[in-house]
Image: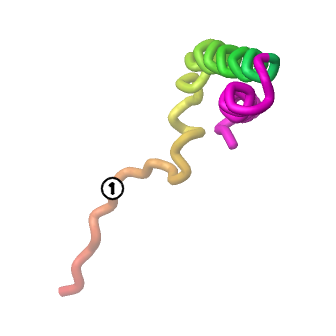
Amino acid sequence: MGANSKQGWYLFLFLVGFTFLPAGLAYLGPIFSLIGLGCLIASCVGFYQIKPLEHQVSAEKTNPVPVQAPTTAKRAV
């Protein structure tokens, strides 16, 4: 769901809030609307707090192919 567990949980919280807010407005009542709104706000705040953590990974860990010096191919004469 997310790149790390915190992103996954905040994405799940966003989906729950996104489901509860319109369901509460349409059918279930104001309690579910408030719960949905609270979930959406909490997920937005959580995503904002963990945003700086995304770019702290070193380049060696993000690149799956190790960087090598270019080699010159020898031609057959």
Report the residue marked by disc 1.
70
- Look at the numbered disc 1 and give the secondary structure of its residue: loop
Q: Position of residue 48 (x, y in %)?
A: 58, 15
In this rendered view, identify the residue nearer to me: 33 or 65.
Answer: 33
Residue 23's place in the image compared with 77, above or below, is above
Q: Check residue 63 for magenta coloring.
A: no
Q: Main secondary structure of the magenta part?
A: helix
Task: State the quadrant of the N terminus.
Answer: top right
Q: Position of residue 18 (x, y in %)?
A: 66, 31
Quarter holding residue 6: top right
Tell me the magenta residue range.
1-30
Residue drawn at the location 45% of the way across and 48% of the way down: 67
- Please state if 74 lies on the left or on the right of 60 as rendered: left
Q: Position of residue 7 (x, y in %)?
A: 68, 30
Q: Amino acid at mark 1?
A: Pro
In this rendered view, identify the residue nearer to me: 1 or 39.
Answer: 39
- Please state if 72 lies on the left or on the right of 15 as rendered: left
In this rendered view, identify the residue nearer to me: 56 or 42.
Answer: 42
Residue 45's place in the image compared with 13, above or below, is above
Q: Position of residue 60 (x, y in %)?
A: 55, 38
Farthest bottom residue? Answer: 77
Q: Check residue 10 for magenta coloring.
A: yes
In this rendered view, identify the residue nearer to me: 18 or 51.
Answer: 18
Residue 77's place in the image compared with 23, above or below, is below
Query: Few, some or many C-alpha atoms within 10 Å of disc 1 (few <14, some 14-19, many ≥20)?
Result: few
Residue drawn at the location 76% of the way across and 17% of the way down: 30
Residue drawn at the location 26% of the way across and 74% of the way down: 74
Residue drawn at the location 62% of the way across and 18% of the way down: 44
Quarter holding residue 34: top right
